Image: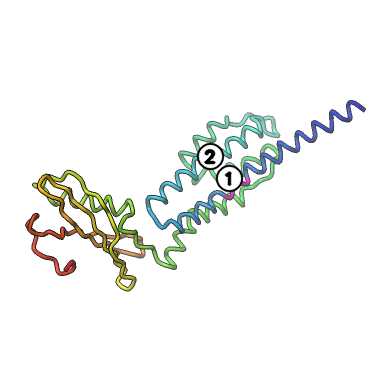
Amino acid sequence: MTNTIRDSGESQSSLNWSTQRLELVSLALILPLIAALLIIITESNTWTVAISATLVVATALLISIDAKFLGRKDRSNRLAEKPYILFIGLVLVWVLVYPLAFFRRARFGAPNLAAPGLLSLIVFMGGPSLYFRHFGYPLPSATSSEVVKAVNDYIRSNFKGVSIRSIGNYQEVSFDPNKQARRGSCVIKTKEAEVAAIYEISWHDRSKGLFQVTVMPADMDLFGFPPDPRFS
């Protein structure tokens, strides 16, 4: 009777571990789908990089933990790579190792999830691109990090001879949906004064998601620029 109770407890423990492994690997399959959706929603190159990096690390961690649960010896009693090696491979070459990691599970008698893994990979890698190609890439906002960087770089590289202390107070002024153009403003602080500047974001090649930023100070005289009719 005692042995029966012990066996039942061991079976229940084994079932719990199996359920936890399945939850880990299921989450690793779902995360790329969530990441693809977030990339579409955020509509930002900066967020795309952040989301992608987080996805790679998170799935690498989950799959490595699952590999530790599966053990080092497969059904043929062959010694497999250590979980941390799998983690490093996923971080360095995620697009190749990610689907292979799910195929690897079959060696240990676990369900072969290579097909779902490959599907998740395809959705993540191609889903956002197909969406934006069909519906059009969103024009970055006037306060997005990529636009702010472009404005900063443009001002500091083109307005040489002017002692610029800081550039800030970025705001979006307007958006023309027909022309697909945004206008923003910022403040350039020099030793002599604070100068208002306006800039325009427009498409260079929308099919590829490439935009351009044109910057022109509102106080033209300080920089010696002639008036630009686009900013009148």
SS for callout 1? helix
Q: Residues within 10 Å of mark 1 (few under 14, many from 20)?
A: many
Q: Which residue sits at x=53%, y=32%?
A: 85
Q: Of all residues shown, which one is farthest toward the top? A: 2
SS for callout 2? helix
Instruction: Please provide percent x and percent y for residue 31.
Output: 55, 49
Q: Nearer the viewer, residue 126 or 186?
A: 186
Instruction: Please provide percent x and percent y for residue 66.
Output: 62, 37
- The colour scheme used to paint the residues is rainbow
Q: Which residue sits at x=32%, y=73%?
A: 178
By secondary structure, the bulk of the magenta-drawn segment is best described as: helix
Disc on res. 60: 2
Instruction: Please provide percent x and percent y for residue 73.
Output: 66, 30
| Vertical comparison of 1 with 61: above or below | above
Q: State the extent of the magenta-drawn residues as a range.
A: 26-30
Give the left or right position of residue 169, taking residue 127 as reference: left
* Image quarter hosting the N terminus: top right
Q: Which residue sits at x=13%, y=51%?
A: 159
Residue hosting label 1: 28
Disc on res. 88: none
Give the left or right position of residue 47, taking residue 24 as reference: left
In the rendered structure, which amino acid carries the disc numbered 2?
A: Ala
Instruction: Please provide percent x and percent y for residue 46.
Output: 37, 50
- Is residue 68 one of those drawn in magenta? no
Q: Are marks 1 and 2 in contact (CB under 8 Å)?
A: no
| Vertical comparison of 198 with 51: above or below | below
Q: Which residue sits at x=68%, y=37%?
A: 108
Give the left or right position of residue 230, taking residue 203 as reference: left
In the rendered structure, which amino acid carries the disc numbered 1?
A: Ala
- Is residue 29 one of those drawn in magenta? yes
